Amino acid sequence: MKILLHTCCGPCMLPVAEKLVAAGHDVSTYFYNPNIHPRAEYERRLEAYQAAVRSLGLEMLPPPQYEPQAYFRAITFREEERCRLCYQLRLFEAALACRDDRFEAFTTTLLVSPYQDLDAIRRVGEAAAEAVEVKFHFEDFRPLFPRTREMAGKLDLYHQKYCGCLYSEIEAEEGRRKKERGRVRA
């Protein structure tokens, strides 16, 4: 099957793409992530993604311009729903790219992370596919998650420490501070 792989980052893309190719799929990748903040983080992830794609010899659709405004417009005053809304934003764009570039289906590397809501991603992916009249390839890629670090390490790729959005950056920093306070007390 000719499949478009929406990609959140290079490390997550590596084992997912490898598995899809091994299953006989013709895989191309698409990096659409207006949620990533700040711009410097976006650039680092984009570079790591491009290096990962080259390492596997895959085709990639040109990434759209970095427009974090799209993310903030989608989630403003609905921050408690931000992950689902972020999935909607990104997967709807992937579905459009799937249709416009005549792929048979699309999927996403978001399905590899144990930190993401698999059921929400599935519902959003299927709804986007139905709205655009394409197929969403759902597969639980979470067993591949340990390979993300392993494969990225072999290629010396940047591996981020938070999901990408400003809110997850704040939460990750709070978690690090909490750990540090716990070590100081011990």
Image (spheres, grey):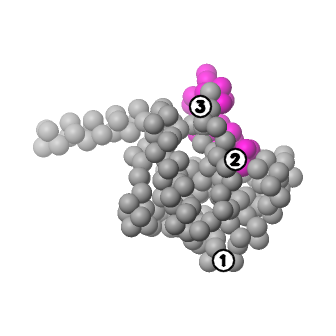
> Where residue 140 appears, x then y in whole percent?
60, 64
Image quarter of the N terminus: bottom right
Main secondary structure along the magenta-highlighted residues: helix
Say which residue appears at 64% left-offset and 37% top-offset. 65
Q: In this rendering, is residue 107 above or below 154?
A: above
Image quarter of the C terminus: top left
Q: Which mark is residue 91?
A: 2
Considering only order in the chain, which callout, 3 or 1, is on the residue closer to the N terminus? 1
Say which residue appears at 72% left-offset and 49% top-offset. 94
Q: In this rendering, is residue 163 above or below 101?
A: above
Q: Secondary structure at mark 1?
A: loop
Considering only order in the chain, which callout, 1 or 2, is on the residue closer to the N terminus? 1
* Mark pair 2, 1: CA separation: 23 Å
Q: Is residue 168 found left or right of 8 in the rendered image?
A: left
| Residue behind mark 3 | 68
Considering only order in the chain, which callout, 3 or 2, is on the residue closer to the N terminus? 3
Say which residue appears at 27% left-offset and 37% top-offset. 178
